[in-house]
Image (tube, rainbow, N blue to C red):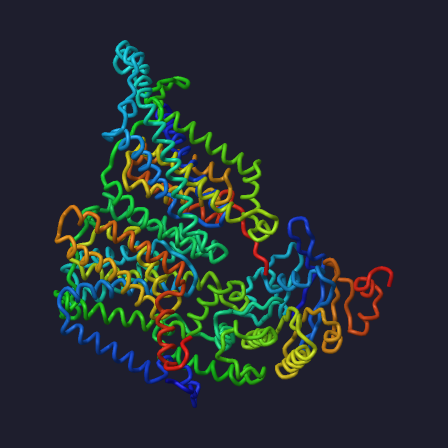
Amino acid sequence: MINGNLKSSYGSDERIVNNGYKQAFVYGSFLCLAAFALFANDYMILIACQVGILLVAVVGINILTGYTGLISLGHGAFVAIGAYAVTILHNAMDGIVPDALTALIAIPVAVTITALIGIIVGLPSLRVKGLYLAVATLAASFIVIFIVENETFAGYTGGVVGINTPVPNLLGWELDTKREMFIFISVSAVLALLAGQNLFRTRVGRAFIAIRDRDYSAEILGISLLRYKLMSFALSAAYCGMAGALFAYFYARILPEQFELELSLELIAAVIVGGMGRTLGPLFGVILIVLVPELIKVTASVVTNGDTASTRIIAPLQEIIFGLLLIFFLLKEPLGINHIVDRLIRAANRWPFARG
Amino acid sequence: MGQFLQFAINGLMSGAIYALIAVGIVSVYKATKVVNFAHGYLIMFGAYFYFTFAVIVPQAAWAPAWLASWQPDWLVAAKADAPMFSPLGAVLDWVSNLPRIILGISGAVIANALLGRLVERTLMRPLMGQSIFAMIMVTVGLISILSGASSIIWTADAAFVPHIAPNTPVRFSIGDTMIFLFGADLVNMVIALLLFGGIVLWVRYTKSGIAIRATAEDQSTAYSMGISVPKVFSRAWVLACTTGAIAGAILATRNGVSPTLGLFGFSVLAIVLLGGLDSYVGVFIAAMSVGVLEAMTQWKLGGEWAEIVPYVAVLLVLLVRPHGLMGSKEVERI
Amino acid sequence: MLKIQDLHLSFGGIKALKGISFEAVPGEITGVIGPNGAGKTSLFNAISGFYTPDKGSVHFDGRDISGLGPDRRAVLGMARTFQNIALFRGMTVLDNIKLGAHTRLNTTLWQALRYFGQARSDELALRRDIEERVIDFLEIDHIRKLPITMLPYGLQKRVELGRALAMQPRVLMLDEPVAGMNREETADMARFILDVQEEFGTTILLVEHDMHMVMDICTRVVVLNFGEQIAEGSPEEVSGNPAVIKAYLGAAA
């Protein structure tokens, strides 16, 4: 039980991991990740990689929707842009740039491209609020997918049938197994979370929150709405671009349909379910959004013994449960899983005294 | 010129259908301030209900034979006399289908109205007075539920349904150009326009329409003036779902019934924003213009380019006019 | 310092301001008074850049700032509070006040993402600065970690003043700083406002209904009625002005 929270310097008061429990949690998580990379079986690695990739994107959405209060229903398109940009860059640099360097060039360039496109798509956000932006981003994502699928650009994108993706090589370390990819993905995801948390200890992150809570009040403090909304948009797009790059490296082949509306909805749903505007919200949300459909699949295959007639309903069932989950949280726990966890920790802290 | 006119008319015909779909989104927005992202999927349900009542039910073993194909003696006789592929033949075929078309339309309207009421009562009502964001995201969740449910209930295959009107070819000339149309498309357009106009007049002049407008202005004031806001909410949803059922039936006859019908909702959403969310007139203009633009794109660039026309149009218009063509600007008090 | 020249503002057909001209006394407190609906808040909104006037100009430091948005004006050194408290309700007192210092920091996005290094030392310097200059000054150290929603009205008003002070403004505009407060709270707030003026030499522009307070602390008073400027002068001059008495007490007086 934590009794006092007394500090002797402003520095220690500004720390986030400011007590033994939090330190234990953070270092414990790192240990768990390392142990996971060593001992988990292939199936678990596969699922964990999916979680990691989505997490990077969802941290970005959290910055945009959770902290800045701008809704996007089209961020799946930015994941697509990241994935395709990395693939196309690899193909373009093939034979020109040494393999050991290609990924190190391709990733930052792809992320930058995604961020720039993010700024363009974000332009309507300056003039309009809320749902206009949601529809604008939705429209933009349809256009992006259309361009990817279109025959005119099929030479670069592979069109509707998709394109094979490269194997990343980081300064000679070829990530050709899923386990190696897991290490890369989990390091990226941890860094993404960390950077996302850091942001909100500084004036940039505070400005985002200020815009979300009361935009005219933010303006009166000298925060340029134009600059910060675009910054938030570019940043969230960059996160999605990074997720896209990981996506391309992780899977052997990418298809345009993987980045359609469904992905965009998953991203926003993960933020809402996990807890908007909370550091660990994306983590909780992504785990739930990935695990629940997986659980349905596993249960269904056990129950039906692989009967084809009933496997037909697995995909729609996953869709329905996904929608129900989203609606359940909106109706019953709008602050998300993070809030449930907060309550549990508080109760544990006060035990054996009254819960509350 | 000839081609241009032909495509323009085709465009106006699909524009009218867009307008009919849009009227549901606008009405729900006006009454509840919620943009219904799932409207396209409600329309898809309308289409599937039409398919159920116009195809599945009449073909069921227990259904009377006249329901599937009505063949009274006079009709059989008339058919025997009619020349092959003549307009009269098409009309007579339509008459045989009439029982199941009527069952289909009325079944779809009733079933969809019930669905709308269910959605409003279970998902929207609990959030009344809370954040609009949550309500909008609930409609987003509804997308997945409706889309998953439809593929479980009806399987995911595309299927065909009877036309609402005799699908006889119509030829006429404007100036020296021949225009070629299908009768069913023409009737669809007329139905869509009548419904659109009817709803606009209803909202403008009837008591319940005025209640919707008052609620749109200020929910709590409307409530305190004796208007039952929950009733207005549910009325708006039912209205959106019934017009959606008819729009769905029409779409089903044009494109066949398939899960992709839900995506129509998104292009119409783009059109609605283009026109200005709370303005029937603006939305009508937008629907017609996008219909024509799509037809022109189809003519000049090919069919697949037409599908992104509404999205490109809405992005361009929002940059110049953030509240759409005729939407009202929200004035903020500080 | 702050000069308003012939300001006209209208909403549709309603003329909210009709030719307002005055100058805030540098380093002193200038009061703007007037009956309800006189256009005081509209005047503030026009000065801080939310409304674009139809005619007239706002000069700051001899520079015409009429075309600038609110955020640009804040960068120049203009701060304000709102009649109905525009704090960020979900945030703590500390974060609200830190937000006030936004324009004084230079942390870039890159530094923010890394945090350790420049961003951290910026933040620590800021923390020390606002602790010593704002939180101690306004005597709100006991509530610094509390979210705004948990504070009583009077303290919220004080935090909003603190947020404006964190900007280190050269002109501070206070929109009804003691509205809805009891006598004791009003006296506290008046003392803080005087302290700000004395300690930092800030030019203060004040909209207020509480006549006693205005007469006590202002060196110059501008009186508005139905969008028109009916009087300007020292508190004594204004309180003896027949037009002002008429506006406040009706024609018979």
Q: Is residue A232 visible?
A: no
Asked whether, in this view, residue B226 is left or right of residue C101, the answer is right
Residue located 49% across and 32% down the image: B197
Viewer-nearest residue: B220 or B204: B220
Residue located 81% across and 71% down the image: C239
Find residue B157 and report its horizontal and vertical position in percent.
22, 39
Asked whether, in this view, residue A293 is left or right of residue B171, the answer is left
Q: Quadrant of the N terminus of chain A?
A: bottom left
Viewer-nearest residue: A107 or C180: C180
Q: Is residue B154 visible?
A: yes
Q: Is residue B129 above or below residue A5?
A: above
Find residue B321 and report its horizontal and vertical position in percent.
49, 47
Viewer-nearest residue: C61 or A162: A162
Q: Quadrant of the C terminus of chain A?
A: bottom left
Find residue A331 and report its horizontal and vertical position in percent.
40, 58
Judged from this view, the residue extending furthest toward the bottom is A8
Judged from this view, the residue extending furthest toward the right is C252
Quarter of the rendering containing residue B289: top left
Residue located 51% across and 46% down the image: B231
Quarter of the rendering containing residue C242: bottom right
